Image: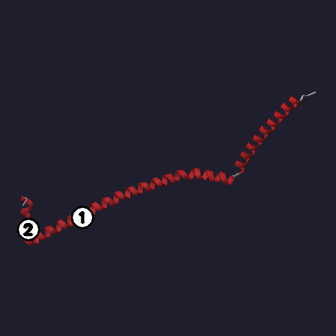
Amino acid sequence: MTTRIEQDDETARLRADIARTRAQLAASVDALTARLDVPGRARDAAARRVEPVRRLAGDAVTAATTVTGVAVATATRATGVAWGLARDGAGIGVALARWGVGSVARVFTRGG
C-alpha cells in the first residue's frame, strides 16, 4: 500500500519528467525548423559574404577619393604655375618690345 506522500512524490517526479521531455522536444523542433528554413539560411550565408565585399568597396571608394583629391590639388598647382610662367613670359615679351633685347638682358644678368 502506498501512502499519500509517496503518491505525491511520484506525481512530482512524473510532472518534472514531462516538463523535461517537453523542453527537449521544443529544442528538437526548433533545431529542425532552423535546418528546414532554407531561404533564411541562404539569406544569412549571403549576408556573411556580402559584408566583406561592402567593406572592400568602401575602402576602394575612400582610396579613389583620396587619389582624386591629390590629383585635383596637383593640377591646380600646375595650372597656377603655368599661368605664372605665361604671365612672366608675357612680361618679358613686353619688356623686350619696349626697351629692346640689350636692356632686358642687362636686368637679368646684373640684377637690375
Residue 80 in the image, given as x and y percentages of width and height: 25, 63
Disc 1 secondary structure class: helix
Along the line of sight, which residue is nearer the eye, 6 or 109? 6
| Mark 1: few/some/many CA within 10 Å (<14, 14-19, 20+) | few
Q: State left or right for residue 42 relative to residue 92.
A: right
Residue at the far bottom: name it: 97
CA separation in Å, label 1 and label 2? 24 Å
Task: Tell me the residue that label 2 is attached to.
Answer: 101
Residue 23 in the image, given as x and y percentages of width and height: 75, 41
Q: State left or right for residue 99 relative to residue 45.
A: left
Along the line of sight, which residue is nearer the eye, 98 or 6? 6
Disc 2 secondary structure class: helix
Residue 56 in the image, given as x and y percentages of width and height: 49, 52
Mark 1 and mark 2 lie on one chain; the one further toward the N terminus is 1
Residue 111 in the image, given as x and y percentages of width and height: 7, 59
Along the line of sight, which residue is nearer the eye, 94 or 41? 41
Report the residue at 14% width, 69% height from top.
93
Report the residue at 13% width, 71% height from top.
94
Please tell me in which quadrant of the rendered image residue 3 appears: top right
Q: Amino acid at mark 1?
A: Ala
Q: State left or right for residue 3 relative to residue 109.
A: right
Quarter holding the C terminus is bottom left
Residue at the far front: name it: 4
Q: Amino acid at mark 2?
A: Val
Please tell me in which quadrant of the rendered image residue 109 appears: bottom left
Tag shown at residue 82: 1
Q: Is residue 20 above or below residue 88?
A: above
Quarter holding the N terminus is top right
